[in-house]
Amino acid sequence: MIIQPIIKGQVAKSCHPLGCATAVKDQIAFVRQAEQIANGPKKVLVLGASSGFGLASRISLAFGGAKADTIGVAFERGPSEKGIGTAGWYNLISFEKEAKKEGLIAKNFVGDAFSPEVRKSVVDFIKTEFGGSVDLVVYSLATGVRPDPQTGELIRSSIKAIGEPITGYTVNLEKDCFEESTLGAATEKEIEDTVKVMGGEDWEEWINYLSDEGVLAEGCQTFAYSYIGSELTYRIYHEGTLGQAKAHLQKTSDALDAKLKEIGGQAHVAVCKALVTKASVFIPAFSPYILALFRVMKAKGLHEGCSEQMQRLYRDCVYRKDGKVLTDENRLVRVDDWELRDDVQEEVRKIVAEMTPENFKELGDYEGYKSDFLKLNGFDLDGVDYAQDVDIEAM
Ligand code: NAI
């Protein structure tokens, strides 16, 4: 079968298994040659391990110096009569293959991280085949829906503004154009539901469960990821529904930190840079900012992808020689520092102010944005022969 990219709106409806394998290998090659993580963890659980920051965390911790055994949990679809499956499915398989070549344990659980069954399977595996405990738990889920822990009813998150609606431009990846879109104003219920889905509740449940089951090692750390961004995007993100969920995540990290102190451990939220991931392309009115940001950060030699961010996070901010986690005054670990540099933001502001549907490809880095999106789905990668027949069964 010859596989072509199919994009509908902001969603990729196809993925290329060989391209996904190449993308994973490229990320591994990057972290191998990067400055290494010293004193890293040895047994890591990554929730949301199949793409974006979760996959990059797993790759950094396995191949970027720590040589960690890893368990990855993700919600992905394999090949079936309905289609090829999702990119994350192939990312998981490729990661596992590469890690095993290295003699590392790499176990994947494909299922709903919110479900008690998945939690139990993970804990059983830790107890029986993973040495009994983990010393790092990475929480990197991004999802629009979560079953209510009590009733099982589905709760949906909303990407909305709080207060007045906002109208701005959004890239349409299918048509390669800039379209006006409106970020509606959230109701109280929508805010509450977004916090329930994307806030810290499930992270806390996972840590409590792992702790009750006695599988958190002495000194265990846990991290979840957040975004703050600059004033240019505050109304869209930081002061919107997602920002409320992230505030909850931050509050949760304080509660978890207090709990983990009992075993000499810690909990933190790491604030990351804006990047193209399956989740972030959905944020309406956010694209002008990210296109301008990529243009400016690339020109200044400051641009990072998920792997660069995660390697820097764990090497320079977490597993440091002095044993201290580097945080700001709010206990947040900031790897969004380069994005928020004054000189970067000043140039981004100018570009965003001038961006229109006619000039966004010249002023912003649309080429890089689109290429990153295609790469997430295994397309547009060097070294892959897209004209060749792909045998999905053999993956
Ligand atoms: P992503 O969409 O690339 O990855 C999300 C992961 O969650 C995937 O592995 C997916 O399979 C998994 N997942 C979703 N629902 C699940 C479920 N029910 N059960 C098990 N696994 C499930 O997302 P991305 O962008 O890497 O986001 C991860 C975290 O990083 C989020 O908290 C996000 O807010 C944060 N972040 C993202 C930024 C960005 O620009 N993309 C910037 C800063 C923070």
Image (cartoon, rainbow, N blue to C red):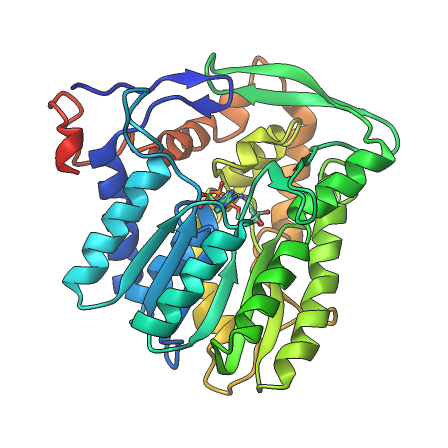
Q: Residue at x 16, y 36 (%)?
A: 383
Tell me if residue 301 can be seen: no
Q: Residue at x 39, y 77 (%)?
A: 40
Indicate left or right for 143 with 56 as reference: right
The N terminus lies in quadrant: top left
Indicate left or right for 320 with 286 as reference: left
x then y, percent, for residue 102:
17, 65
Q: Residue at x 56, y 56 (%)?
A: 338
x then y, percent, for residue 328:
68, 70
Q: Residue at x 27, y 56 (%)?
A: 28
Q: Nearer the viewer, residue 326 or 159?
A: 159
Where 308 sits versus 288, above or below? below
x then y, percent, for residue 350:
67, 34
Where 235 sits versus 3, above or below? below
Number of residue marks: 0
Q: Nearer the viewer, residue 74 or 66?
A: 74
The C terminus lies in quadrant: top left
**Picture quadrant of residue 231:** top right
Q: Nearer the viewer, residue 43 or 351?
A: 43
x then y, percent, for residue 287:
59, 29
Tell me if residue 368 can be seen: yes
